[in-house]
Amino acid sequence: MVPAGFAVFSLDGDKKPRAYSRRKRHTKTKLGCLTCRAKRVKCDEARPQCARCLRNTRVCVYSGNAISSKLSVLDSVTVIPFPANEQLLAHLHGYWVDVLGLPRTDLVLSMFQASPLVRHAMLALAASHLRHVSPLSTQHRVMEHVQIATALSEYQHHLNIPPADLGRRGADALLTAGVLLSMLAFTLPACETGTGNGEEESPYSSWVFSHRPDRLGWFSLQSGLRHLLVHRATHLDETLRFLTQVFLGVEVDRASFSGAAERGEFIVPELWTRFFGLDHDGGEDNVYRVMVGVLLQLKGHLAAGSNVLNAFQFVAKVQGRFCALVYERDPRAMWMLGYWLGIMWAYPAWWCTQRVRRDYRAILMWLEVSRPEGRDWDDMLGELRSVVDEKPPAHA
């Protein structure tokens, strides 16, 4: 006789119903990886990567003792509710260089702890990186959306503070966050990316072929770096020393960092001089003049190991007039932006690879059809193609 209790229903009348066996009580462990805990599945706790995460090609990070005492400042900050907060903090610790691309110094860690603006910007990048490596995870997409909204709201709040009220530390935090959010703006949003199967994004999904009025929102945020630097023009040497200390780990003075582009110590090819009208179009007022110098300086030097500050020298020189020309799809402005993207092709950072390759190809395709006729244009298209063809393969 079957004892009282639950029975499993059976359609087989010849067999007796089997007794329901309750699960044995077990003690839950808190040592599993954060990914398995978030999904409420069993983790074998293998280090550095558990078997389940390895099998499903997910990011595997651990909390608790896995977070070093040096980063205890990260643990002590509560930004968003558990488990997202814990997962992002652990991910930021475990993949610091991959996510941020900057040295883990006491200066940076103290800024993370003291400045909500810098903290939210870093966590937004961590959330975006999680979505980048696990594109099918709905949880990671939601975390990214929340963190980006929070970071941009904090950024807008600080931009509205008068410089006199912001103070030196506030201005330093604003500049740091500006660079970090420029990196974030470079990432392709989830709606423009594939499923992570290794296929590159179609050039036809680029803003180049779009008519949306907000199609250049990502680039407008990039060019905002110029306004922040102009705001600090009276303290520019000190500002650059601070930024290089944060993003390079060492102080570099203005002359060493800006190099030949700012001093005018570069030779512009005759073809470029004609193409951009540097010999007659407005003299020093020519919108392309300084940017041509930056491109010539960066060409061939932005390779593996280069820092984000080098990559953003171009956008730091972008003026509103140039943004307007790109928005109107002026062929010369499109060529210049495409050439910079071609230089960025060699920069091995997760946040820029997808956009750089997609938009570079899109601009090249657009110019091949829409450019004006002429020998100079034929030659400049050849230069645009060669900026990628001449490069060694970028590191992963």
Image: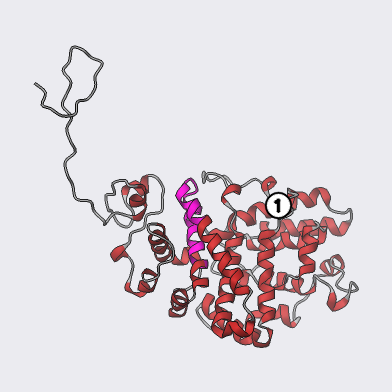
Residue extending farthest to the left is 1
Q: Position of residue 52 (x, y in %)?
A: 33, 46
Q: Amino acid at mark 1?
A: Trp
Q: Quadrant of the N terminus?
A: top left
Residue at the location (68% across, 54% down)?
A: 359
Residue nearest the viewer, comparing 347 with 145: 145
Seen in the picture, residue 130 relative to 204 is either above or below; the reply is: below
**Residue 147 makes an appearance in the image:** yes
- Measuring from the top left, give residue 103's x and y in whole percent: 47, 73
Magenta stretch, main secondary structure, is helix
Residue 15 placement (x, y as % from top left) = 17, 15
- Position of 3 relative to 316 (above/below): above
Characterize the local packing of mark 1: few (<14), some (14-19) or many (20 or more) Cα atoms within 10 angstroms.
Answer: many
Q: Which residues are magenta?
A: 121-144
134 in magenta: yes
Q: Position of residue 351 (x, y in %)?
A: 56, 59
Viewed as shown, does residue 31 lie left or right of 91? left
Give 165 or 217, whichever is nearer the viewer: 165
